[in-house]
Image (cartoon, rainbow, N blue to C red):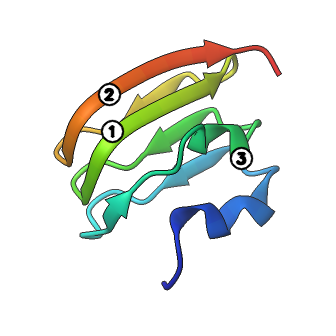
Amino acid sequence: VTGGIETLSFLSRMTKLDLSGNRLSGAIPLRFASFFPNLVHIDLSNNEFGGCADMTFSSGTLYANYSNNRFTCASFKKYNP
């Protein structure tokens, strides 16, 4: 896979995103989860993402796992689409 993680945004109807355990690196874009308003499940654990994780989820997101990465700060919020 090449490019930033936001290149997956064409999958806006996706309900589950599991990229865990892939040694992915770099920063996660601001409001990343807003590219995927229908996500119920998101797992980006066990990678090498770094920087500040500014995650804003839709109210329908029930599961989010960002553990075991290299984040230096994190902010998690919910919004109503």
Q: Earlier in the sequence, mark 1 or mark 3?
A: 3
Q: Secondary structure at mark 2?
A: strand
Kindly identify the residue that appears in the image at 37 percent across and 37 percent down: 53
Between marks 2 and 3 in the image, the one whose residue lies nearer the viewer? 2
The kind of residue tagged 3 is Phe
Q: Give how far apart the Cα atoms at labels 1 and 3 are.
A: 18 Å
Crowdedness near tag 2: few (<14), some (14–19) or many (≥20) residues, C-alpha within 10 Å: few
Marks 2 and 1 sit apart, C-alpha to C-alpha, by 5 Å
Q: Which residue is mark 1?
A: 52
- Which residue is labeled 3 in the image? 35
- Identified by mark 2, the residue type is Ala
- Measured as percent of width and height from the top left, residue 11 is found at 76, 61
Q: Earlier in the sequence, mark 2 or mark 1?
A: 1
The label on residue 74 is 2
Q: CA distance from mark 2 to mark 3?
A: 18 Å
61 versus 19 height, above or below: above
Q: Quadrant of residue 79?
A: top right
Residue at image point 48% right, 84% down: 1
Q: Residue 61: x percent and y percent? A: 61, 25
